[in-house]
Amino acid sequence: MHRRQGLIAAAVAIGALVTGCGSDVVSVTPADGHADPLCSKAGAHWPDTVASQAKQAVSTAGKTEAAWGDPAIIARCGVSMPSPSEDCISANGVDWVMHELSDGKSFVTYGRLPAIQVLVPKDYAPEPMVLGAFSAAAKQIPQGQHRCS
């Protein structure tokens, strides 16, 4: 059930990614748990650039969502932690569960609650290469007992 909810959340956020292309402000839907204080802490550590792309303005007033480039790489804090998966990878000491999307990939931190989701369009392939930029933000949320094996 969690995987289905995560994919639905990714689809909503990817819809925002499409509407954000070509405009001055990227439309991002906040995650359900975005009000968690750990998300504010993580958001204070979003990188200035990702994949050589500058940070873009987003439609939300909070700091728990961010975007870079066009098409936009989108990060948002407060999503549910995904279920264990064979598509679990580590980047700079942070575990991520990857899901294929029609226009890119969704990565969600694994073992950290609240979780951070990063949506990466195909234009930035290989998509996992951008994850290192999010290590400082993800490490603001303590690692729980769940890890990639």
Image: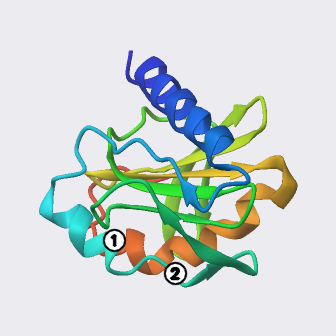
Q: Which amino acid does label 1 sit on?
A: Gly
Q: Is 81 displayed left or right of 57 in the figure?
A: left
Identify the residue shown where x is 42% and y is 32%: 83
Q: 10 Å neighbourhood of mark 2: few (<14), some, or many (≥20)?
A: some
Identify the residue shown where x is 74% and y is 75%: 51
Identify the residue shown where x is 13% and y is 64%: 37
Residue for badge 2: 47
Q: Which amino acid does label 2 sit on?
A: Pro
- Place residue 44 in its image quadrant: bottom left
Q: In which quarter of the image is the N terminus?
A: top left
Under circle 2, the secondary element is loop
Between 42 and 72, the residue placed more toward the observer is: 72
Spot the residue most to the front.
24
CA distance for labels 1 and 2: 9 Å
- Which numbered circle lies on residue 43? 1
- Place residue 106 in its image quadrant: top right
Q: Relative to 134, does residue 118 appear above or below in the rendering? A: above
